[in-house]
Image (cartoon, grey):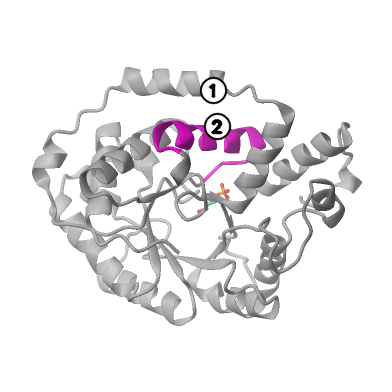
Amino acid sequence: MIERNPGCELDLGWLNNVNINLNAVNAAVTDLLNSRELKNEHRAAWLLRAITCIDLTTLAGDDTASNVSRLCLKAAKPLPEDLLNELGFEYGSDCPIRTAAVCVYPSRVEDAVKMLTKLNLLDKINVASVATGFPSGQMPLKTRLEEIRYAVEKGATEIDIVIDRSLVLTGQWELLYQEIQQMKEACGPKAHMKAILATGELGTLNNVYKASLVAMMAGSDFIKTSTGKESINATLTFGIVMSRAIREYYDKFNYKVGLKPAGGIRTGNDAISWLIMIKEILGNEWLNNELFRFGASGLLGDIEYNLFKYVTKYYPVSYEFTVG
Ligand SMILES: O=C[C@H](O)COP(=O)(O)O
Protein backbone atom coordinates (compact mmCIF):
# COMPACT_ATOMS: atom_id res chain seq x y z
CA MET A 1 0.00 0.00 0.00
CA ILE A 2 1.15 3.51 -0.80
CA GLU A 3 2.31 5.68 2.11
CA ARG A 4 -0.50 7.66 3.73
CA ASN A 5 -1.01 11.34 2.99
CA PRO A 6 0.50 13.37 5.85
CA GLY A 7 -1.61 16.40 4.92
CA CYS A 8 -0.50 19.96 5.58
CA GLU A 9 -1.64 23.15 7.26
CA LEU A 10 -4.86 24.67 5.98
CA ASP A 11 -4.04 27.26 3.32
CA LEU A 12 -7.07 29.55 3.00
CA GLY A 13 -5.26 31.75 0.46
CA TRP A 14 -5.12 28.76 -1.90
CA LEU A 15 -8.88 28.35 -1.64
CA ASN A 16 -9.49 32.02 -2.33
CA ASN A 17 -7.75 31.72 -5.70
CA VAL A 18 -9.97 28.90 -6.95
CA ASN A 19 -11.95 29.79 -10.06
CA ILE A 20 -13.23 26.93 -12.22
CA ASN A 21 -14.04 27.63 -15.86
CA LEU A 22 -17.23 25.65 -16.47
CA ASN A 23 -17.03 25.92 -20.27
CA ALA A 24 -13.50 24.54 -20.30
CA VAL A 25 -14.52 21.62 -18.08
CA ASN A 26 -17.54 20.86 -20.28
CA ALA A 27 -15.34 20.98 -23.40
CA ALA A 28 -12.91 18.54 -21.74
CA VAL A 29 -15.80 16.13 -21.02
CA THR A 30 -16.96 16.31 -24.65
CA ASP A 31 -13.42 15.63 -25.91
CA LEU A 32 -13.12 12.65 -23.61
CA LEU A 33 -16.39 11.12 -24.74
CA ASN A 34 -15.42 11.61 -28.40
CA SER A 35 -12.00 10.01 -27.95
CA ARG A 36 -13.35 6.67 -26.72
CA GLU A 37 -12.87 4.65 -29.89
CA LEU A 38 -10.55 1.81 -28.93
CA LYS A 39 -9.47 -1.38 -30.64
CA ASN A 40 -11.18 -4.45 -29.18
CA GLU A 41 -8.09 -5.92 -27.55
CA HIS A 42 -7.32 -2.57 -25.96
CA ARG A 43 -10.89 -2.39 -24.68
CA ALA A 44 -10.51 -5.83 -23.09
CA ALA A 45 -7.29 -4.75 -21.38
CA TRP A 46 -8.92 -1.57 -20.05
CA LEU A 47 -11.87 -3.60 -18.77
CA LEU A 48 -9.59 -6.04 -16.94
CA ARG A 49 -7.76 -3.08 -15.44
CA ALA A 50 -11.10 -1.63 -14.38
CA ILE A 51 -11.97 -4.83 -12.47
CA THR A 52 -8.78 -4.54 -10.43
CA CYS A 53 -9.75 -0.99 -9.45
CA ILE A 54 -13.24 -1.78 -8.17
CA ASP A 55 -14.30 -1.39 -4.55
CA LEU A 56 -17.10 -3.93 -4.88
CA THR A 57 -19.85 -2.42 -2.82
CA THR A 58 -22.98 -3.37 -0.97
CA LEU A 59 -24.57 -0.61 1.08
CA ALA A 60 -28.16 -1.65 1.53
CA GLY A 61 -30.48 -1.76 4.51
CA ASP A 62 -31.01 -5.48 4.00
CA ASP A 63 -27.32 -6.46 3.87
CA THR A 64 -26.63 -9.68 5.78
CA ALA A 65 -23.61 -11.84 6.56
CA SER A 66 -24.53 -14.09 3.67
CA ASN A 67 -24.76 -11.42 0.98
CA VAL A 68 -21.49 -9.93 2.22
CA SER A 69 -19.94 -13.42 1.90
CA ARG A 70 -21.21 -13.62 -1.68
CA LEU A 71 -19.79 -10.17 -2.35
CA CYS A 72 -16.38 -11.40 -1.14
CA LEU A 73 -16.60 -14.47 -3.38
CA LYS A 74 -17.37 -12.21 -6.32
CA ALA A 75 -14.48 -9.92 -5.40
CA ALA A 76 -12.19 -12.96 -5.33
CA LYS A 77 -13.49 -14.38 -8.64
CA PRO A 78 -15.03 -11.50 -10.55
CA LEU A 79 -15.34 -13.41 -13.84
CA PRO A 80 -16.42 -16.97 -14.64
CA GLU A 81 -13.37 -19.25 -14.71
CA ASP A 82 -13.69 -20.28 -18.37
CA LEU A 83 -13.96 -16.66 -19.49
CA LEU A 84 -10.93 -15.71 -17.40
CA ASN A 85 -8.94 -18.59 -18.89
CA GLU A 86 -9.84 -17.47 -22.42
CA LEU A 87 -8.43 -14.08 -21.50
CA GLY A 88 -5.12 -15.66 -20.55
CA PHE A 89 -5.41 -15.76 -16.75
CA GLU A 90 -6.01 -18.48 -14.17
CA TYR A 91 -7.44 -18.17 -10.69
CA GLY A 92 -4.82 -18.85 -8.04
CA SER A 93 -3.10 -16.99 -5.27
CA ASP A 94 -1.13 -14.81 -7.70
CA CYS A 95 -4.00 -14.09 -10.10
CA PRO A 96 -4.16 -10.29 -10.52
CA ILE A 97 -7.80 -10.29 -11.63
CA ARG A 98 -9.69 -9.58 -8.44
CA THR A 99 -11.29 -6.43 -7.13
CA ALA A 100 -9.28 -4.02 -5.01
CA ALA A 101 -11.65 -4.06 -2.05
CA VAL A 102 -15.09 -4.86 -0.81
CA CYS A 103 -16.97 -1.91 0.66
CA VAL A 104 -19.63 -2.38 3.34
CA TYR A 105 -21.29 -0.73 6.33
CA PRO A 106 -19.39 -0.84 9.67
CA SER A 107 -21.72 -3.53 11.05
CA ARG A 108 -20.78 -5.85 8.17
CA VAL A 109 -16.99 -5.39 8.36
CA GLU A 110 -16.57 -8.46 10.55
CA ASP A 111 -18.47 -10.60 8.02
CA ALA A 112 -16.21 -9.45 5.20
CA VAL A 113 -13.06 -10.03 7.26
CA LYS A 114 -14.23 -13.55 8.16
CA MET A 115 -14.99 -14.50 4.58
CA LEU A 116 -11.79 -13.07 3.11
CA THR A 117 -9.81 -14.83 5.82
CA LYS A 118 -11.54 -18.08 4.87
CA LEU A 119 -10.62 -17.45 1.23
CA ASN A 120 -7.05 -16.67 2.28
CA LEU A 121 -7.31 -13.30 0.55
CA LEU A 122 -7.37 -10.86 3.44
CA ASP A 123 -3.93 -9.60 2.44
CA LYS A 124 -5.01 -9.17 -1.20
CA ILE A 125 -8.50 -7.69 -1.04
CA ASN A 126 -9.03 -4.70 1.21
CA VAL A 127 -12.00 -4.31 3.49
CA ALA A 128 -13.39 -0.79 3.18
CA SER A 129 -16.07 0.54 5.47
CA VAL A 130 -18.16 3.64 5.05
CA ALA A 131 -18.43 5.66 8.24
CA THR A 132 -19.25 9.05 9.80
CA GLY A 133 -23.00 8.87 9.39
CA PHE A 134 -22.99 7.64 5.80
CA PRO A 135 -24.59 8.81 3.58
CA SER A 136 -25.70 12.19 5.00
CA GLY A 137 -22.96 12.89 7.57
CA GLN A 138 -25.64 14.54 9.68
CA MET A 139 -24.67 13.21 13.09
CA PRO A 140 -22.74 14.64 16.02
CA LEU A 141 -18.98 14.56 15.40
CA LYS A 142 -18.43 12.35 18.46
CA THR A 143 -20.69 9.66 17.00
CA ARG A 144 -19.08 9.97 13.56
CA LEU A 145 -15.58 9.52 15.00
CA GLU A 146 -16.70 6.58 17.11
CA GLU A 147 -18.04 4.89 14.01
CA ILE A 148 -14.61 5.09 12.37
CA ARG A 149 -12.91 3.56 15.43
CA TYR A 150 -15.47 0.77 15.48
CA ALA A 151 -14.91 -0.13 11.82
CA VAL A 152 -11.12 -0.09 12.24
CA GLU A 153 -11.37 -2.25 15.36
CA LYS A 154 -13.44 -4.79 13.42
CA GLY A 155 -10.75 -5.01 10.75
CA ALA A 156 -11.46 -2.37 8.10
CA THR A 157 -8.26 -1.23 6.42
CA GLU A 158 -9.90 1.55 4.44
CA ILE A 159 -12.44 4.04 5.77
CA ASP A 160 -14.74 5.96 3.43
CA ILE A 161 -15.82 9.00 5.44
CA VAL A 162 -18.51 11.43 4.33
CA ILE A 163 -17.94 15.14 4.84
CA ASP A 164 -20.52 17.45 6.38
CA ARG A 165 -21.79 19.21 3.26
CA SER A 166 -23.27 22.07 5.29
CA LEU A 167 -19.73 23.22 6.14
CA VAL A 168 -18.96 23.58 2.43
CA LEU A 169 -22.24 25.29 1.61
CA THR A 170 -21.68 27.86 4.37
CA GLY A 171 -17.95 28.32 3.66
CA GLN A 172 -16.77 26.97 7.03
CA TRP A 173 -13.50 25.64 5.61
CA GLU A 174 -11.57 25.69 8.87
CA LEU A 175 -14.17 23.59 10.63
CA LEU A 176 -14.30 21.19 7.66
CA TYR A 177 -10.50 20.85 7.78
CA GLN A 178 -10.54 20.20 11.54
CA GLU A 179 -13.28 17.57 11.27
CA ILE A 180 -11.52 15.69 8.49
CA GLN A 181 -8.23 15.84 10.41
CA GLN A 182 -9.93 14.29 13.44
CA MET A 183 -11.43 11.61 11.20
CA LYS A 184 -7.98 10.76 9.88
CA GLU A 185 -6.71 10.53 13.43
CA ALA A 186 -9.58 8.18 14.30
CA CYS A 187 -8.44 5.90 11.46
CA GLY A 188 -5.39 5.08 13.60
CA PRO A 189 -1.89 4.54 12.29
CA LYS A 190 -2.65 2.25 9.35
CA ALA A 191 -6.10 2.55 7.76
CA HIS A 192 -6.30 4.62 4.60
CA MET A 193 -9.01 7.26 4.47
CA LYS A 194 -11.16 8.19 1.49
CA ALA A 195 -13.15 11.42 1.83
CA ILE A 196 -16.54 11.36 0.14
CA LEU A 197 -17.34 14.91 -0.93
CA ALA A 198 -20.88 14.19 -2.16
CA THR A 199 -20.14 16.51 -5.08
CA GLY A 200 -23.76 16.47 -6.30
CA GLU A 201 -24.71 18.36 -3.13
CA LEU A 202 -21.95 20.98 -3.07
CA GLY A 203 -23.69 23.56 -5.26
CA THR A 204 -20.80 24.71 -7.48
CA LEU A 205 -17.67 23.34 -9.13
CA ASN A 206 -15.66 25.94 -7.19
CA ASN A 207 -16.93 24.28 -4.01
CA VAL A 208 -16.01 20.86 -5.38
CA TYR A 209 -12.45 22.05 -6.04
CA LYS A 210 -12.14 23.79 -2.67
CA ALA A 211 -13.57 20.79 -0.76
CA SER A 212 -11.09 18.56 -2.64
CA LEU A 213 -8.19 20.77 -1.52
CA VAL A 214 -9.37 20.93 2.09
CA ALA A 215 -9.86 17.15 2.23
CA MET A 216 -6.32 16.59 0.91
CA MET A 217 -4.77 19.21 3.19
CA ALA A 218 -6.48 17.47 6.14
CA GLY A 219 -4.80 14.18 5.21
CA SER A 220 -7.27 12.25 3.01
CA ASP A 221 -5.55 9.50 1.07
CA PHE A 222 -8.29 9.45 -1.57
CA ILE A 223 -11.02 11.86 -2.51
CA LYS A 224 -14.26 10.24 -3.58
CA THR A 225 -17.08 11.81 -5.56
CA SER A 226 -20.26 10.47 -4.04
CA THR A 227 -22.05 8.09 -1.72
CA GLY A 228 -24.16 6.64 -4.51
CA LYS A 229 -27.22 7.96 -2.65
CA GLU A 230 -27.25 11.55 -3.97
CA SER A 231 -29.44 12.45 -6.94
CA ILE A 232 -26.30 13.37 -8.93
CA ASN A 233 -23.41 11.01 -8.32
CA ALA A 234 -20.13 10.33 -10.18
CA THR A 235 -19.96 12.46 -13.32
CA LEU A 236 -16.90 13.06 -15.48
CA THR A 237 -17.32 16.79 -14.86
CA PHE A 238 -16.74 16.27 -11.14
CA GLY A 239 -13.98 13.78 -11.94
CA ILE A 240 -12.07 16.29 -14.06
CA VAL A 241 -12.35 19.01 -11.42
CA MET A 242 -11.22 16.68 -8.62
CA SER A 243 -8.38 15.26 -10.73
CA ARG A 244 -7.10 18.76 -11.41
CA ALA A 245 -7.15 19.46 -7.67
CA ILE A 246 -5.20 16.23 -7.09
CA ARG A 247 -2.69 17.29 -9.74
CA GLU A 248 -2.27 20.71 -8.13
CA TYR A 249 -1.78 19.12 -4.70
CA TYR A 250 0.84 16.79 -6.19
CA ASP A 251 2.67 19.67 -7.89
CA LYS A 252 2.81 21.51 -4.58
CA PHE A 253 3.60 18.70 -2.12
CA ASN A 254 4.84 15.85 -4.31
CA TYR A 255 2.22 13.58 -2.74
CA LYS A 256 -0.18 11.50 -4.82
CA VAL A 257 -3.76 11.45 -3.55
CA GLY A 258 -6.09 8.87 -5.10
CA LEU A 259 -9.45 9.37 -6.78
CA LYS A 260 -12.56 7.25 -6.31
CA PRO A 261 -15.60 7.96 -8.46
CA ALA A 262 -18.63 6.21 -6.99
CA GLY A 263 -22.32 6.07 -7.62
CA GLY A 264 -24.09 5.17 -10.83
CA ILE A 265 -21.07 3.72 -12.67
CA ARG A 266 -22.71 0.80 -14.42
CA THR A 267 -21.10 0.13 -17.81
CA GLY A 268 -17.77 -0.87 -19.26
CA ASN A 269 -17.90 2.27 -21.39
CA ASP A 270 -18.30 4.43 -18.26
CA ALA A 271 -15.32 2.69 -16.70
CA ILE A 272 -13.14 3.20 -19.78
CA SER A 273 -14.00 6.90 -19.96
CA TRP A 274 -12.92 7.32 -16.34
CA LEU A 275 -9.66 5.46 -16.91
CA ILE A 276 -8.86 7.54 -19.98
CA MET A 277 -9.64 10.72 -18.07
CA ILE A 278 -7.22 9.65 -15.32
CA LYS A 279 -4.53 8.81 -17.87
CA GLU A 280 -4.91 12.21 -19.53
CA ILE A 281 -5.04 14.41 -16.42
CA LEU A 282 -3.01 12.50 -13.86
CA GLY A 283 -0.96 10.12 -16.01
CA ASN A 284 -0.20 6.41 -16.05
CA GLU A 285 1.08 6.47 -12.47
CA TRP A 286 -2.50 6.87 -11.27
CA LEU A 287 -3.81 3.95 -13.35
CA ASN A 288 -3.69 1.35 -10.61
CA ASN A 289 -5.72 0.50 -7.55
CA GLU A 290 -3.35 2.23 -5.15
CA LEU A 291 -4.43 5.54 -6.64
CA PHE A 292 -7.67 4.90 -8.45
CA ARG A 293 -10.85 3.06 -7.47
CA PHE A 294 -14.38 2.71 -8.76
CA GLY A 295 -17.01 2.52 -6.01
CA ALA A 296 -19.57 0.31 -7.70
CA SER A 297 -22.22 -2.25 -6.89
CA GLY A 298 -23.31 -3.06 -10.45
CA LEU A 299 -20.38 -2.44 -12.80
CA LEU A 300 -19.01 -5.98 -12.92
CA GLY A 301 -22.04 -7.34 -14.76
CA ASP A 302 -21.54 -5.12 -17.80
CA ILE A 303 -17.78 -5.71 -17.81
CA GLU A 304 -18.38 -9.46 -17.85
CA TYR A 305 -20.89 -9.01 -20.68
CA ASN A 306 -18.38 -7.01 -22.74
CA LEU A 307 -15.54 -9.45 -22.14
CA PHE A 308 -17.78 -12.39 -23.05
CA LYS A 309 -18.63 -10.63 -26.31
CA TYR A 310 -14.93 -9.94 -26.96
CA VAL A 311 -13.95 -13.59 -26.41
CA THR A 312 -16.85 -15.35 -28.15
CA LYS A 313 -17.71 -12.65 -30.74
CA TYR A 314 -21.40 -13.03 -29.98
CA TYR A 315 -23.87 -11.48 -27.54
CA PRO A 316 -24.44 -13.60 -24.44
CA VAL A 317 -27.92 -14.73 -23.50
CA SER A 318 -28.95 -14.43 -19.89
CA TYR A 319 -28.21 -18.04 -18.81
CA GLU A 320 -24.61 -17.67 -20.02
CA PHE A 321 -24.14 -14.83 -17.67
CA THR A 322 -23.21 -15.05 -13.99
CA VAL A 323 -23.73 -11.53 -12.74
CA GLY A 324 -27.17 -10.02 -12.25
O1 LIG B 1 -19.46 3.84 -2.77
C1 LIG B 1 -20.12 3.22 -3.55
C2 LIG B 1 -21.46 3.54 -4.02
O2 LIG B 1 -22.40 3.49 -3.00
C3 LIG B 1 -21.85 2.60 -5.11
O3 LIG B 1 -22.89 3.16 -5.84
P1 LIG B 1 -23.67 2.29 -6.94
O4 LIG B 1 -24.51 1.33 -6.13
O5 LIG B 1 -24.49 3.28 -7.69
O6 LIG B 1 -22.70 1.55 -7.78
Q: Please give the residue where the numbered disc 1 appears in the rendered image.
A: 33
Residue 206, image quadrant:
top left
Gap in Å between the C-alphas at discs 1 and 2? 7 Å
Q: In percent of the image, x 36 and y 63: which residue is there? A: 3
Q: Disc 2 on helix, strand or loop?
A: helix
Proximity of marks 1 and 2: CB atoms separated by less than 8 Å: yes
Q: Position of residue 310 (x, y in %)?
A: 80, 35
Q: In percent of the image, x 70 and y 26: which residue is there? A: 39
Quick check: 20 left or right of 257? Answer: left
Relative depth, front residue between 49 and 148:
49
Residue 14, image quadrant:
top left
Q: Position of residue 240 (x, y in %)?
A: 39, 33
Q: Is residue 308 magenta?
A: no
Q: Disc 1 on helix, strand or loop?
A: helix
Mark 1 Cα within 10 Å, few/some/many (few <14, many 20+)?
some
Residue type, mark 2 in image: Ser
Residue 297 at least partly seen: no
Mark 2 Cα within 10 Å, few/some/many (few <14, many 20+)?
some
Q: What is the total number of numbered labels drawn onto the structure image? A: 2
Whether residue 221 is situated above or below residue 232 in the rendered picture: below
Q: Is residue 280 magenta?
A: yes
Quarter of the picture containing the N terminus is bottom left
Relative depth, front residue between 277 and 129:
277
